[in-house]
Image: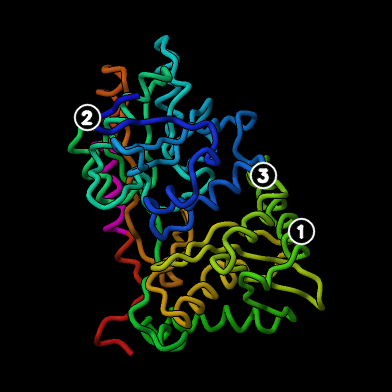
Amino acid sequence: MDSLPELTLSLHRAIAEIPAADWDACAGDNPFVSHAFLSALEDSGSVSTKTGWLPQHAALRDAGGQIVACAPCYAKSHSQGEYVFDHGWADAYERAGGHYYPKLQVAVPFSPVPGPRLLRRPGIPVAALAQGLAQAMQAIECSSVHVTFCTEEEWHALGEAGWLQRLGLQFHWHNHGYKDFDDFLNALSSRKRKALRRERRSVAESGLTLRTLRGAEITPAHWQAFYRFYRNTVDGRWGGAYLTRSFFPLLGERLGDRVVLMWAEREGTPVAGALNLLGDEALYGRNWGCEEEVPFLHFELCYLRAIDFAIEHGIGRVEAGAQGEHKIQRGYLPAPTYSAHLIAHRGLSRAVAEFLEAERTAIRERMEDLATLSPYRHDDEG
């Protein structure tokens, strides 16, 4: 399908149809858009027609056939597993007699992790892939295209191309050159510093053994236990697990040292774990689960040990996933997230545009309010 002069867009029903080297040459360092991560989702059956995520990966080729841009795309029959909620848009359109599904989702399934979505070699503009996606929407008869958790650069470029812009909110920790965890604690107000020390002391006195496992240190037995933890958490909270049992071993096999597992055991028996993926600039928290409720253990494994790891390895940022104002008192501050949306029906597009304008204002105001809760001390505090 021609998308621009001398550029051709094709859609692929499996990421295996696109060579890993070509895909990763466009993808950069973010592990969630790597060929390895996305193929693990498909090969494990976590992403499939059966689960309502039909791969339609976009590849943009130049006149010589080289892939110069690509995007992880899925034709969706529902709005689950996305973390950018458009259920209200779908309901309104369906009530008006329209068909919101299928829609085209440019995203990393089940992963509210900001990063590049329109993956490009140097010199290829966002507009080239954006135009191709708009044509793909028409060709496969989707109501809309949604690029979720994209970069700010992509967000602005898509806005300039006429896409609707949406803001979201997460909480990220930034490494300001801390020498160790105590150095980080010293940047906090006295009250917050004491609170975190009490939390860590409580976990240390719980009788648990805590470990940080990476790459080949993570065995099949660890993944078996972690899948139990994952199911305990997901089934108890949402009633259905997206990721299959085979996904986690595949992830460990294909991403190697990029996989970092914070682990807790009691007398050799695993009781909890937190899964992270490592990029060049950030540690990304993803899944957590447990079989024993221990006070403050969730905060320790998911947030504080992630900070420990980032400081030790000189990582500039920790992104600990969606939601959670409780993260603020542990040093994670408000950060915007970005999504862009192209809706074919003009009436629905206008209505959504009005909603998003008001929502962006509310998000910015909320971020300002949350910033006042920062645990970091002022220069005149001890």
The residue under label 2 is which amino acid type? Answer: Pro
For the image, the number of numbered tags is 3
Q: Earlier in the sequence, mark 3 or mark 2?
A: 2
Q: Amino acid at mark 3?
A: Ser
Q: Position of residue 150 (x, y in %)?
A: 35, 47
Residue indicated by mark 2:
5
- Secondary-structure class at tag 1: helix
Q: Is residue 5 above or below residue 239?
A: above
Query: Colour scheme in the image?
Result: rainbow
Residue 49 relative to residue 372: left or right: right
Residue at the image position 37 percent from the left and 30 percent from the top: 145
Q: Find the residue positioned furthest to the left.
A: 160
- Image location (x, y in percent) of residue 253: 64, 60
Whether residue 191 appears in this view of the structure is yes
Task: Tell me what residue is drawn at x 64 percent, y 80 percent.
Answer: 202
Image-quadrant location for residue 132: top left
Q: Does residue 351 appear to the left or right of 50 in the view shown?
A: left
Asked which quadrant contains residue 375, the reply is: bottom left
Q: Which disc number belongs to residue 224?
A: 1
Residue 365: in magenta span: yes
